[in-house]
Amino acid sequence: MSDCVFCSNIVSGKESHEFFRSDRIIGFMDKFPVEDGHCLIIPRKHYVNILDIERQVYLDIHNLARYVSRAVMDVFHADGVNIGQNNGECAKQVVMHYHLHVIPRHCGRELMWSRLDRSDQELEKYANMISTRLNDIINLDII
């Protein structure tokens, strides 16, 4: 879908700070994070939301989210993690391509939902750190 920013930039490989790519899904850093370590997992194939995504692709994304959550918590010394997914404009879905947010959380620090300004170098560094930790946690061949 040429009008989808995820399809044209992330899936195509033009612009992303990836920590994971398989034949069905991609994990990458949110370009406008609300916390350092905020990342996204998307299907490579275009699905608008939870109502049209294929079951196995959905399961792949959420299975990876389990491992990414541990990696993000370890790398960013987080106390917890938020997993979020919005469906439809009135539910605040901005990019109409199914995506799952993984956001590290720290006790005592309120999440303000304001976007942080991080450089491409910082985002690439974070992606590399998560990728390294993911490789320590799981055998990526099973996903």
Image (spheres, rainbow, N blue to C red):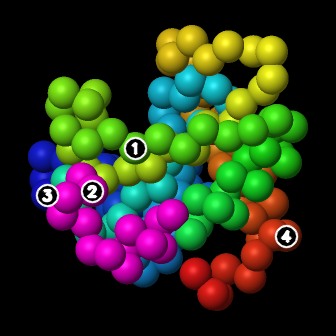
Q: Decide: marks 2, 1 in contact (CB < 8 A)?
A: yes
- Find the distance from the CA under tag 1 to the CA under tag 4: 27 Å
The residue at 58%/81% (across/down) is 143
Residue 125 image position (x, y, % from top left):
72, 43
The residue at 18%/63% (across/down) is 52
Which mark is first along the chain, 3 or 4? Answer: 3
In reply to whether residue 50 is colored magenta, the answer given is: yes
- Find the distance from the CA under tag 4 to the CA under tag 3: 35 Å
- In this rendering, does residue 97 appear at all? yes
Q: Which residue is mark 1?
A: 85
- Find the distance from the CA under tag 2 to the CA under tag 4: 30 Å
User: Is 26 situated left or right of 35 in this image?
Assistant: left
The label nearer to you, 3 versus 2, is: 2
Dot 4 crowding, Cα within 10 Å, few <14, some 14–19, many 20+ = few
Dot 2 crowding, Cα within 10 Å, few <14, some 14–19, many 20+ = some
- Find the distance from the CA under tag 2 to the CA under tag 1: 9 Å
Q: Decide: marks 2, 4 in contact (CB < 8 A)?
A: no
Q: Which residues are magenta?
A: 49-62
Camera-side residue of 59 and 133: 59
Q: Amino acid at mark 3?
A: Met
The residue at 75%/38% (across/down) is 80
For numbered disc 4, what is the local secondary structure?
A: helix
Residue 140 image position (x, y, % from top left):
67, 80
- In this rendering, does residue 15 appear at all? no
The label nearer to you, 1 versus 4, is: 1
Residue 116 drawn above or below residue 31: above
Which mark is first along the chain, 4 or 2? Answer: 2
Q: Which residue is mark 4?
A: 136
Q: Amino acid at mark 1?
A: Gln
